[in-house]
Amino acid sequence: MKLENLGASAAKVITGRTALVVTDEHVGALYIERATVSLEKAGFSVFTFTIKPGEASKNADNYLALLNHMAEIPLTRTDCAVALGGGVVGDLTGFAAATYLRGIPVIQVPTSLLAMVDSAVGGKTAINLEAGKNLAGAFHMPALVLWDVSLLDTLPEAQFQDGMGEIIKYGVLSDAELFGNLKNPAWTKENLEFLVKRCVEIKESFVEQDRFDRGERQKLNLGHTIGHAIERASDFTVSHGCAVALGMLKIAEVATKNGWCEAKIVPELREILNVYGFSTQMPWDMPTLCAIMRADKKRKGDEIDLVIPERIGSCVLKRLSLKELEQILCEA
Ligand code: GLY
């Protein structure tokens, strides 16, 4: 759907007529005008709140400033917040919308590939705390997600690759045909609209079964346990998509070594990661990553649910103690 349809689509799901558009300086310079015009044409009074681009903006200070801005306007329970941007804007806006007046509607307008296929879908919202990423948050389903792949025309190549890490994950997780098509990067570029739609469909199917992330939805974390540890070990200089790519490869190697999956999964993954320019060299030793994984927020006491690929297109959850996890990672 085009960004120009934002106002008309919002008017169908929002009963109030005040909208606060939250964006960052980069995305705002490119798209806030089009978003505002569309909302105003549909009868909305539009306010804006702009943050600095980057993960550091997903902090408690910006969260409080955003809540105060909502209260000053004031937004009421029938109005809405609109997140126009990537994952940082989406998560921050979503969390503020989840908690302001105990919850007002949020519309997600993702502008990065990663946000289109992942963070804008499924209602997870959060900010970072000193102790780690996404440690304060809420589940708050968007009233509407509007993704317009033409907004990706301005996306830097590195951010495109970042999104590809998650897209490859969807193939490994539940769509072998998609995985096969992704081997051809020309197909990917020509079928972006279909690709985003398919990934959103896959994500929604997991979210529908388990909205609050207690079972099936956890499979969406394929490659993330190791991936998050890599992100932290690198002080977030390794992007999320690159870290997830490496995490998937490592867990496939572990699964192969333990006889939990088809052996061809590792060469297939290496091949596709090479196609999209991902490094397949693990730059950190496992004891370092295991120490970080001990602080993983998805840990359940001394246990952690690991997503294991059985074959391309199918994964299972396996509950391991932290000790077992360390053992299998260090042996592989
Ligand atoms: N990004 C994983 C989830 O939304 O559950």
Image (cartoon, rainbow, N blue to C red):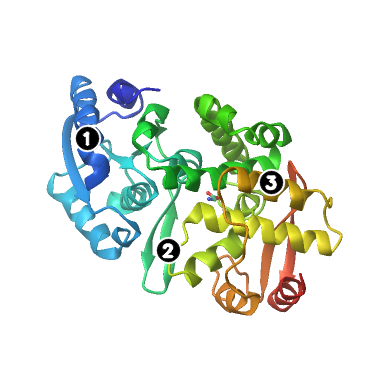
Q: Position of residue 21 (x, y in %)?
A: 24, 39
Q: Is residue 144 above or below residue 264?
A: above
Is 312 left, or right, of 208 in this rendering?
right
Q: Position of residue 22 (x, y in %)?
A: 25, 44
- According to the picture, the residue beneath numbered tag 2 turns out to be 237
- According to the picture, the residue beneath numbered tag 1 turns out to be 32
- Looking at the image, which residue is at 41% across and 74% down? 131
Residue 271 numbered tag: 3
Residue 37 in view of the camera: yes
Is 235 left, or right, of 46 in this rendering?
right
**Whether label 2 touches label 3, CB < 8 Å:** no
Q: Is residue 39 above or below residue 234?
A: above
Task: Measure how far apart labels 2 and 3 are at the Cα level.
Answer: 24 Å
Q: Is residue 93 above or below residue 237?
A: above
- Looking at the image, which residue is at 70% across and 76% down? 326
- Looking at the image, which residue is at 33% across and 51% down? 102
- Quarter residue 256 falls in: bottom right
Report helix, strand or loop for mark 2. Answer: loop
Q: Position of residue 100 (x, y in %)?
A: 28, 51
Query: Callout 3: few (<14), some (14-19), or many (20+) C-alpha neighbours within 10 Å?
Result: some
Mark closer to the observer (2, 3): 3
- Quarter residue 116 falls in: top left
Q: Earlier in the sequence, mark 2 or mark 3?
A: 2
